[in-house]
Amino acid sequence: MNGAASLLFALCGVLFLGAVYYMLASKKPGVYPPKSIQKKRAGALAGAGAVFFLLAFILTGFS
């Protein structure tokens, strides 16, 4: 269980870093893909990161 929780926490961190990357990229002028798509990607990555964080938090509670 601890290994699975650690893996989920690591995946959560990677997803949040990806969300931060896309959010910062959407602030730059003249980028491709369009800013609206980058914001959607950032939101999707942040949402997935939150789900994995909750799953990892639940798994650590059981062990």
Image (cartoon, helix red, strand yellow):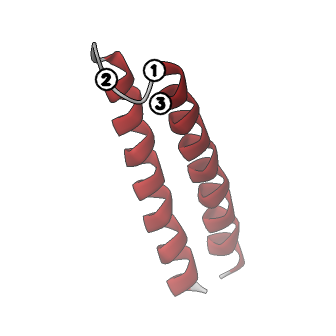
Whole-number angstrom distance, CA of label 2 to CA of label 3: 10 Å
Q: Quadrant of residue 1?
A: bottom right
Whole-number angstrom distance, CA of label 3 to CA of label 1: 5 Å
Amino acid type at circle 1 is Lys
**Label 1 near label 2: C-beta < 8 Å?**
yes
Amino acid type at circle 2 is Val
**Is 48 in front, or is 63?**
48
Q: Report helix, strand or loop for mark 3.
A: helix
Task: Relative to 24, say whether 6 is above or below.
Answer: below
Q: Quadrant of residue 13?
A: bottom left
Q: Report helix, strand or loop for mark 1.
A: helix
**Label 3 near label 2: C-beta < 8 Å?**
yes
Amino acid type at circle 3 is Gln
Badge 3 crowding class, 10 Å Cα cut-off, few under 14, some 14 to 19, many 20 or more, is many
Given this view, does label 2 or label 3 mark the residue nearer the observer?
A: 2
For this view, does 19 lie left or right of residue 51? left
**Label 1 near label 3: C-beta < 8 Å?**
yes
Which residue carries the number 2 mark? 31
Where is residue 15 drawn, in percent x and y?
47, 52
Q: Which dot marks residue 35?
A: 1
Where is residue 44 drawn, in percent x and y?
61, 41
Badge 1 crowding class, 10 Å Cα cut-off, few under 14, some 14 to 19, many 20 or more, is some
Which residue carries the number 3 mark? 38
Q: Residue at x 45, y 40 (%)?
A: 19
**Is 53 in front, or is 36?**
36
